[in-house]
Amino acid sequence: MKNKLSLKYVGFFLMLAILVLLPFVNDSRTLIILLTQIFIFGILAMSYDILLGYTGIVSFGHAMFFGIGAYTSAVMLKQLEPTLSTFLISIVVGILLAGFISFLVGLLTLRLKSHFFAMLTLAFSGLFLVVAEKWRSVTYGNDGFTFRAPEIFRDRMTFYFFVLACLVVIFLALYRFVNSPTGRILIAVRENEQRTKSLGYNTLHYKVIASIVAGTVASLAGSLYAVSLRFVNTSVMTMDITLDALLMTIIGGVGTLVGPLLGSAVIEYAQHALSGLARDYPIFERWIIFFGILYILAVIFFPKGIIGSLRLMFWKWRLKHKEKDQTSVGPSQEKERFE
Amino acid sequence: MELFVNLVINGLATGMLIFLLAAGLTLIFGLMDVLNFAHGGLFVWGAYAGIFTYVFTESFLIGIVGAVLTGALLGLITEKLIITPVYGNHIQQILITLGLMLVLQELIKVVFGPNGVAVKTPSYLTGSWEIGDVIIIKYRVFIIVVGFIIFGIFQYMLKKTKIGLVVRAGVQDKEMAQALGIHIKRVFLYVFMVGAALAALSGMLMAPYSGVIYAEMGMEYAILGFIVVVIGGMGSFSGSLLAAILVGLAGSFMAYYVPVLSLAVNMILMAVVLIFRPQGLFAMRKERST
């Protein structure tokens, strides 16, 4: 156990060191922008996994919180002075707003069964999309608007480090969260809600907490996304954003935090690479079709995604390995390992 | 007066199209306990395949047949490949049918191109009648008539025939129907195919009504279909007709009087129904354990 833990730390710091040093080794603009994009969507996908992977609820309205963050930052930076402090305040405002709305929506909808919840979140995010489209005096509708980013983020490199820092902080915070007693109860809700209820936990309460955590983190991702583009329009509220988060989580691995990050890297990179190929082969313009098929196959054959499947293989291998050493492995021990 | 009649006819026509879409959804849900998020994909494939056949053969009727056959065929493939592996697991069903929706929608763009296709109404259905000072557009009446005919046929089949009895028994209690010797998996397959065919028919009829078809229309109308299924009560066939007419009328009146709200009114309607009466406005007396 001790050994495994230190392995995790080594991996974490190694990855962090690579990502910090990378811009100094290779400062190509496209690479920096691509990585920034990967980090932002990684944050979004991690927040989505709190719902899908840890609590076991499918929300189709995640774009709503992403959009709230994006619009809050964009509107504040446009209406007020585009300084760093405005941006930081706008992040906080976005988080508070998203937290409040996810609390309300969660309280109203999380009592319902999965089907109804999925549809109702779809409807709520549809409502927000309509608001963003119709409230033209602030959002400029479908055309969107450009705004000036804080002076310090003009340099792509600074912004890259800022987003990386956000990613690390969010990753560690969520890691703490899912391993906290509350996080354990969320997993219990996913495994068997009825039983968790009969153990005396108010599951609605915990599901609302999960929804608030996911909503606020998604809002942060939205704020970062808006500043990375220096432009915002209604596309941040559309179903496509939710679908992206869903794809990243499923392909990377549900129920892990590294999985969504990996999924974000795979999908963003593939999107980047395939859109390059599309100039020669028009079929690659419809790159999403490959992901759709991949996604269907993943749901049928690898419901645990890349990380989950690897982890399962690793445990199986280790179990086999151990059996050779010590012939008897008690069922209780075995169960502990799979967690 | 003229305005009122037109708004009613408009609302009824839209309502009928949504009803055709929702009827399949609600039957599939009631019987199989599967919420098919790919229904909009079947709808849009029906529209494109039907219009393709229509343009090719220059006969609107053959176009409709083409759409229905495409829908049934896609339904067969979907049930066998996509739905069968995930029976009983709601979360996987939601995820996988949404994935299929994505693939169907993108395939449309690959096969027929990403831009919308303009559609002409067949000559014998274009134009309008003038009764007094009220102008009634023929095609809208045609949709309403077709909708009511289909509702009549299905209502008769469900209530009066052996097949309908089997389906109703399956909706009420799957295990019991199975114990009485009914091959329930086969019934699932047929119901899924019929639902898909209805969705395709709805798409085909929608095409001349809206005048243009595009790949994203699947998702747009599927959302309306879900709303209708929720308002009407999951698994309730006649409930979905009433709910569809309600949604259609609400949409057409709102679009005229309060255009800002026209997109939101149905979503608000659904949210209110789901929060206060999750079993649906017109649900059967029987408590469903879903």
Image: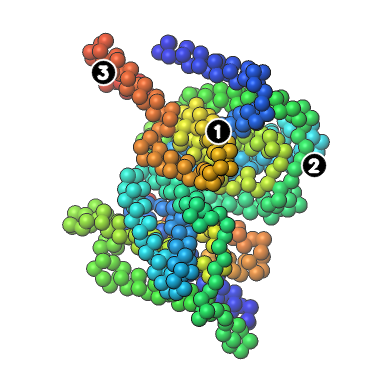
Circle nearer the N terminus (2, 3): 2
Q: Are marks 2 and 3 on the same chain?
A: yes
Q: Which mark, by number, is residue A167?
A: none
Q: Nearer the viewer, residue B254 or B196?
A: B196
Question: What residue does disc 1 label?
Answer: A269
Question: What residue does disc 2 label?
Answer: A79
Image coordinates of residue A177 in percent, x first then y, are 52, 26
Judging from the image, mark 2 belongs to the subunit labelled A
Q: Secondary structure at mark 1?
A: helix
Residue B265: quadrant of the picture: bottom right
Q: Residue at x 32, y 22 (%)?
A: A316
Q: Is residue A199 above or below residue B74?
A: above
Query: Disc 2 vs disc 1: which is toward the camera?
Result: 1
Circle nearer the N terminus (2, 1): 2
Query: Disc 1 vs disc 3: which is toward the camera?
Result: 1
Name the amino acid type tagged 1.
Tyr
Q: Are marks 2 and 1 on the same chain?
A: yes
Name the amino acid type tagged 2.
Gln
Measure the alpha-carbon separation of dots 2 and 1. Answer: 34 Å
Question: What residue does disc 3 label?
Answer: A330
Q: Residues within 10 Å of mark 1 (few under 14, many from 20)?
A: some
Q: Residue at x 39, y 61 (%)?
A: B71
Circle nearer the N terminus (1, 3): 1
Image coordinates of residue B156 in percent, x first then y, are 32, 73
Q: Residues within 10 Å of mark 2 (few under 14, many from 20)?
A: few
Judging from the image, mark 1 belongs to the subunit labelled A
**Residue A258 visible in the current orientation:** yes
Image coordinates of residue A139 in percent, x first then y, are 72, 48
Q: Secondary structure at mark 2?
A: helix
Q: Are marks 2 and 1 in contact (CB under 8 Å)?
A: no
Q: Is residue A159 left or right of residue B277?
A: right
